[in-house]
Image (tube, coloured by chain):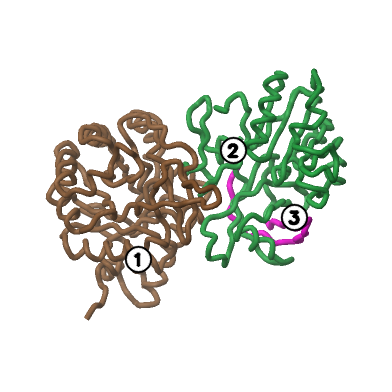
Amino acid sequence: MMRDLSVDIAGLTFRNPVTTASGTFGYGEEFLDFLDPGQLGAIFVKAVTAKNRDGNAYPRMAETTGGMLNSVGLQNKGVDHFCREIYPKVKKFDTYIIVNVSGSTVEEYVEVAEQINELEKVPAIELNISCPNVKLGGMAFGTVPAMATEVTAAVRKVYKKVLMVKLSPNVTHITDIAKAVVEGGADVITLINTLLGMAIDAERRRPVLSTITGGLSGPAIKPVALRMVWQVHKAVAVPVIGLGGIMNATDAIEFILAGASAIQVGTANFIDPQASIKIVEGIREYLERHKIASIKELVGALRTE
Amino acid sequence: MVFKKNVEDLTVIRNLRLNQRHFLLELQSEQPFSLLLPGQFVQALVKDSPSTFLRRPFSIHSVDIPNKRFRLLIQIKGQGTRHLSLLKEGDKLNLIYPLGNSFSIPTTKDVLLVGGGCGVAPLLFLAQFLNQQKIRPVILLGFRSQEETFEIEEYSKYGTVFITTDDGTAGEKGLVVDHSLLQKEKLDFRKIYCCGPDAMMKSIARIARWHKIDCEVSLENTMACGFGVCLCCITPTDKGNERVCMEGPVFNTKRLKW
């Protein structure tokens, strides 16, 4: 029997629930030696800002137990460069291209979103209101409900397609932020972004990262991510896309059971560039083994009685 | 030049311990590799080592293209490399390779290779490659002590070898930058290739600049992926922040903001 892996995300039909997280998949081109993007539900490409950003100074990465810290700082060449140089290449991929939009001010988010709105083959944007890396950036929007609503609503006015908002886990009540972005007009919520963390080199008595603190990702954050996906799925009516330490198909199934309609593979891409397509296969095997016709049946199907 | 990157389980043919901190892994590939060039590196997966989350990057140390084999020279630095040092003949090692750019082909025959510590790793492959271009380089290698020297005979096949040790137990005492070869008023070289600790490469770059000698270095910045997407291994260059894993690891020192 054919197992149906397709999922519906705010009117978009993904061929399967597996997508790749922004900042871990470049613009997709870097992966062409390893996989066919057409085998994925969607790809979320690297964050785009209004102007060129050089990002933070080296060192930007620290390996930690079961994960890694990064402080890349949204290095990218700006939205004009994306539209002119990157888009003509990525639009040929046989999958949804979703652009992660970042900014330091409401006006910057709006400016970028307006330009991306014009790109025919980009059906959605993911608003990054949470990146903890940039001193002037995202953090504040994603941690205060009123500001989360404000930036979402401002982008909603100019962006006519599917608006996804990616939440920061560095908050006390994740559901308050989730409700706030839905109020602002979000069609989809993705979570979680990296957890703010820190690494110290005891021998040198110095921080490992040039920015002292950075974003923690990898399996170390999976339990936190699962909990937040579960809470948000119960609190809002919009679809949730879950991520945070997904390394294999079992991890992906756990997120779907917790309430995610689709998932993003992030840090795992660094270790196994074929992780995402292996997860697609693993999900298919799971459906086969449990005799489930469609992955949709599993969304939020966690048994808690 | 763009290489197709492979993810492959290679077979360990030999694991040779050179001294307390260094070992050589000889690996057998099943598929013929398109081309490997000196300066390129691999990302090795360390299995069953809970504290090792990311792959570990290693330069290609030497190649045997007809037999589809190559070697990695590895220094034991932490849990990951310690784990790899325990690999046995017949074990599999998963690699992503080949990664990065390569040293350029020199336009002169007066070539000096300078390596320090584990930074000597890509220089054997480079020396082999230069021999194929009918160039026999001078090779200057720095070690901690006589006990830590290795493969001097191997390097000697491809060039004239000089060494330094920190404690003077072999070769000249001191750091490679202090070697008498580099203290002359006018140096005999038109091209220098260098790999080692940052401080060493910066000193060599300074000497090269002073003598107006073209100099290339291979950087070892920490990285997560190795194929250009994590943007963690950047170094500032005349074109802004560039990725050591893609635009490097080899850079001409006149392009670096040193």
List the residue tagged with mark 3.
B24
The first of marks 3 and 2 along the sequence is 2
Q: Residues within 10 Å of mark 2 (few under 14, many from 20)?
A: few
Task: Name which quarter of the figure residue B187 lies in.
Answer: top right
- Can residue B142 be seen here? The reply is yes
Q: Amino acid at mark 3?
A: Leu
* Residue drawn at point x = 61 percent, y = 24 percent: B254
Q: For the view shown, which residue lies furthest in the bottom direction? A: A305
Write down the colour of chain B: green
Q: Nearer the viewer, mark 3 or mark 2?
A: 3
Task: Name which quarter of the figure residue B46 lies in.
Answer: bottom right
Q: Are marks 1 and 3 in contact (CB under 8 Å)?
A: no
> Is B16 inside the magenta-drawn segment?
yes
**Residue B13, x across and y down, in percent:** 75, 61
A86 left or right, relative to A205? left
List the residue tagged with mark 2.
B2
Write down the colour of chain A: brown
Q: For the view shown, which residue lies furthest in the left direction? A: A183
Residues at marks 2 and 1, CA–CA distance in whole angstroms = 40 Å
| Predominant secondary structure, magenta span | strand
Identify the chain of the residue marked 2, using the numbered disc in the image.
B
Span shown in magenta: B2-30
Q: Amino acid at mark 2?
A: Val
**Residue A211, x across and y down, in percent:** 41, 42
Q: Are marks 3 and 2 in contact (CB under 8 Å)?
A: no
* Of residues A210 and B249, the one drawn nearer to the viewer in this rendering: A210
